[in-house]
Amino acid sequence: MKVEVGFRLNGYEVRAEVEPHLRLLDVLRDTLGETGTKEGCGEGECGACTVLVDGAAINSCLFPVCEAAGTSVMTVEGLAEANGALSPIQRAFLDHGGAQCGFCTPGIVMAGVALLAENPNPSDAEIRYSLTGNLCRCTGYVQIVAAIRAAAVATRGERGD
Amino acid sequence: MGFEYHQPSTTAEALELVARFPDAEIIAGGTDLMVRLNKTRRVPPALISLRRVQELTHIENGSGLRIGAAVPLRDVATHPAVAAGFPALVDAIRVFGSPQIRNMATLAGNLCNASPGADCAPPLLIYDALVELRSAAGVRELTIEDFILGPGATALEAGEIVTAIRVPPPPPAARSIYLRKGRVQMDLAITGVAARLEMDGATCGAVRIAAGAVAPVPRRLPRTESVVAGAAAGAETWARARAEAQHEISPISDVRASEQYRRHLTGVLVERSLARLASTNGGGT
């Protein structure tokens, strides 16, 4: 029996009729058509499915969609401006080559967003620790860490810190 | 009737649902349960979520702590009273999974999953934590030893849910630490050692040592503790504790490490944790 689940997705109210056993990941991709969020391992190891729920990074493959009801969900689709202008962290990943195949990138970017919201001036060690739940099997992490470091600088500059 | 997802907002409502759906699974953080469901593609008849049960979503700080069963580990680690009085628990949460996992997983869930390597169990053992269980019949409290019965097995009875973990206030002079080794941060422990030590001048006073991933259940090491209690603080005592711990545990060989390496490493962590706790500028509090 389907149930109705409503939440804010990237600033917009969404409602969906869904099977209650589905995961947030399934509903984001298959019902709402937001396919930026990826499924990698399906067991909370790889972080490709990372989204923010009420500001906290979570694995959407381990998150029952019913738990999203009434929350505010942010996915990679919510980062750019309405006119397509990239957010500082997206820009930084492009500038530093922080992606190769790109499959892990949305999850890593969202982990980076969560980190910078909590810690606007992270050390490299803090950046690496914040990425323990995100696997990249192409690039190695050097460019990814550099991108998040640059995004931190750009974000602070934007805010005038 | 198909699958139902229940989200009670009070403990009473949750207990009613647990009684009504005996085959339902209880979910808090979901970081173990959802992996199991994803892997088996199994849909249980119902899930009963504790996430929106108001009474279970906060930490009470009175005489000791009462940590609600639905509080995510991240909120446990960042609570000022936990950081001040229970540093070994903070150490364990720091090495627990990833930021994403810590934003979901709970102490109660970690104990209910009853993994031999449950990272939060050794710290809770040295802090004399109690598991609060409720059912329609009332409330009971069990020690960690009485709650975790074997790999994946707990004393949780039908109709019962874990509602909180209670931790008594620590002795004022006690210092504590949790050291763990895994292959990488995101992997389960090869071994983990929690220790709590009170010093009486240059002599060791009351001591508690517990280890995980080196026996069927996380457990205290009473023989190793008795080597340390009342002994002179120093390298000789730490070395004797190391040797005793290596004999006292009963590890297995698996994909993460051999039995021999687990014995070796556990001894090293016992020695290291005691040395740090006894040094004036070491780790712990």
Image (cartoon, coloured by chain):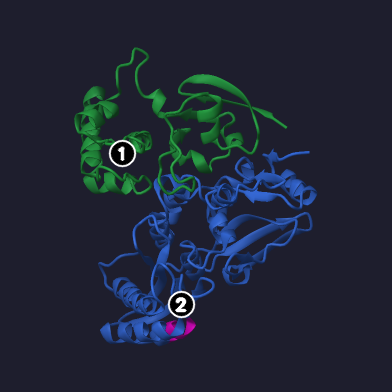
Chain colours: A green, B blue
User: What predominant SS class does the magenta segment belong to?
Assistant: helix
Residue lying at 68% horizontally and 45% vertically, measured from the top left? B48
Lateral position of residue B263 relative to residue A6, left or right: left
Residue lying at 51% horizontally and 71% vertically, measured from the top left? B218
Residue lying at 36% horizontally and 36% vertically, measured from the top left? A103
The type of residue carrying mark 2 is Pro
Q: Position of residue B33 (x, y in %)?
A: 58, 51
The type of residue carrying mark 1 is Asn
What's drawn in magenta, residue-wise? B221-226
Disc number for residue A157:
none
Q: In the rendered structure, are the residues bearing label 2 and label 1 in contact, judged by CB atoms less than 8 Å apart?
A: no
What residue sits right under mark 1 in the picture? Answer: A119
Q: Chain of mark 2?
A: B
Res A144 seen here: yes
What residue sits right under mark 2 in the picture? Answer: B251
Residue density around tag 1, few if under 14, some if 14–19, many if 20 or more, within 10 Å: few
Q: Quadrant of residue B259?
A: bottom left
Q: Chain of mark 1?
A: A
